[in-house]
Structure formats: structure tokens, C-alpha cells
Image: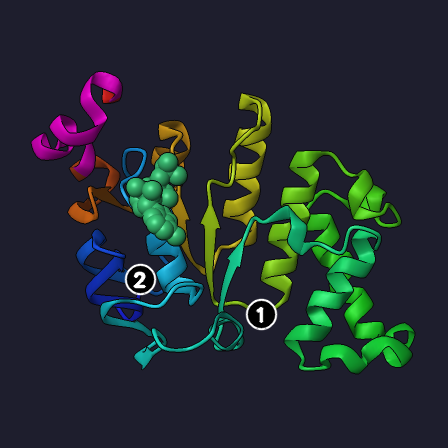
Amino acid sequence: MSTRNALELKGVKKNFGRAEIIRGVNLDIHEHEKHVIIGPNGAGKSTLFNLISGRLKVSEGSVKLFGKDIHNLPAHKVNRMGLSRSFQVTNLFQNMTVLQNLRCSLLWSEGHKYAFWKSVLKQDSVTERANELMERLNLTTQANTPAQLLTYAEQRSLEIGCTVASGAKVILLDEPTAGMSRTEANDVIQLIQRMTGENTLVVVEHDLNVVFELADRISVLVYGEIIATGTPEDIRNNAAVQEAYLGTEVH
Ligand SMILES: Nc1ncnc2c1ncn2[C@@H]1O[C@H](COP(=O)(O)OP(=O)(O)OP(=O)(O)O)[C@@H](O)[C@H]1O
């Protein structure tokens, strides 16, 4: 596995008013790895996500994507550089079908932006790739179903498919299995693994079953600081982590 860093956070701090919420985070995310960030409620996980994706500006420190500073760039520019934050189901075009949503993302990845409507029907190769993606997503039978009529888990699958189709190299997922049954969650984990093979994945997750299933490495965020980063094995056996966060749950 390559050890090039997809993301590098150095001394990242974030204050809201006088409250310091992120308190000097240093974190390297390797290219191609599946990295899961865990931590108790209010630890700052969503804030950290927002700092990486450009939705919030850092108060101090730097965030690099493949060696380039991104911490002062707006979210859409960071997105164009290959980082996509997914799992907001609202990112789907709800009135458009599964096939149309996927085509749209594929065309976006080729830079057609908003001018594709006239040529969309002629894009045979795009349709072919959309069909392949639908198969991998298990959504072929729903090709002509509008996104809004899919089940919750199917919408989330489609959202992942669109993120992959849009050409993102680094994918950020915020609690991808939230609100799902155990079976749905297992299906979605498998789908994530299948769909994001070569991508770098950064996931914030509460569900420890998901965490240990998905992660190559785990970072534990407690009160705005990363107290440990390591393999699932390292994290399970880390006394500080057990004390600060996992407690007896690991056993
Ligand atoms: N825009 C904001 N303004 C002020 N305080 C904020 C803002 N966003 C987050 N906070 C505070 O920062 C702290 C961390 O919140 P954050 O949502 O990042 O934590 P989290 O680890 O994602 O929590 P959870 O697991 O409950 O989603 C909380 O105390 C929250 O109240």
C-alpha cells in the first residue's frame, strides 16, 4: 500500500467564539486507506469534517490534500480537487431517476458541468458506465425510479455511487449507516467496500461494528484532540482509548 498522504492536517485548531473545539489536530490519512474517526458526542468530529471539506475555515494550522493547501479554499474548489463529502441524501436530484443521477455525476467528472443537457442522450459511453455502476450498486432494476421513491438505504447507496462517479479520489462519509437496521447497515458497509476500493475513505462513525469492519486505521478524537491513531487491533488494546471512550463496550 502506498504511503503517500491523501490528507495532512497539521496543528489544526478551531474556535467558536472563545470556545476551542478542535485543539491542535495532527493527522495523516494515507492514500487508499479507509480511516475511521470515532469519539464521544461533542468531541468535534463533525467540526473536523467541516474543516477538511472546506465548509468551515480553520482558526489555526493547515490542511493539505495531496500536498496542496486546501484550508483557505471554498468547499466547491476542494471538491474540484478530488475530495467529496458524501452521505447527505439531499445531494441527490430527487426528481431524477437512478440512471439520470449517475449520468449526471459521470458528466460532472468529465467537466460538462451545466451544459450537458443537449448532449446527454448521445453519451453512449456515459450510459455504459452508468449501467456498470448500477449493477455494482444493485440498483439495475430501479434504473428508471426517481431517487425520491427509493428506500433510505438505497438512496444512500446511490449517493455513494454518485460520489464515486463524480471522480472523487478522497471520500468523506458522515455516519453512513445512521438510522439503518443491522441488515441494512451490513449491506451498506459491503457496498462501501465494493464501491470505494481504490478511493481514500474518511468516515465518522458511532457504530463500533461498522468501525471495526471498515477501518484500516482508526483515530480517536476526544475533546478536540486525537488521543490515538492505529489499526483496529491497536485501538482495541489502547488503555487510554478504553478509558476515555470505549470503556467496556469493546469487550
Ligand atoms: N457553529 C458552531 N458554533 C458554536 N459551537 C459549535 C458549532 N458547531 C459545533 N459547535 C460545538 O462544538 C462541539 C463539537 O461539536 P461537533 O458537532 O463537532 O461534535 P461531534 O463529535 O460531531 O458530536 P456528535 O457525535 O454528537 O455529532 C459541541 O460542543 C458543539 O456545541
* Identity of the residue drawn at 51% across and 33% down: 178
> How many C-alpha atoms fall within 10 Å of the one at disc 2: few (<14), some, or many (≥20)?
few
Image position of 174 (left or right of 179):
left
For residue 88, above or below residue 29: above
The residue tagged 1 is 167
In reply to whether residue 239 is colored magenta, the answer given is yes
* Identity of the residue drawn at 83% across and 43% down: 142
Label 1 or label 2, whichever comes before in sequence order:
2
For residue 139, above or below residue 165: above
* Identity of the residue drawn at 68% across and 74% down: 108
The quadrant of the picture occupied by the C terminus is top left
Hey, which quadrant is residue 125 in on the image? bottom right
Real-space CA distance between mark 1 and mark 2, rounded to the nearest whole angstrom: 21 Å
Q: Secondary structure at mark 2?
A: loop
Hey, which quadrant is residue 211 in on the image? top left
For residue 43, above or below residue 59: above
Callout 2 amino acid: Met
Q: Where's residue 20, x and y in %?
A: 20, 53
Q: What secondary structure is the magenta-colored segment mainly?
A: helix
Per the rendered image, the range of residues in magenta is 235-249
* Identity of the residue drawn at 25% across and 38% down: 232
Q: How many marks?
A: 2
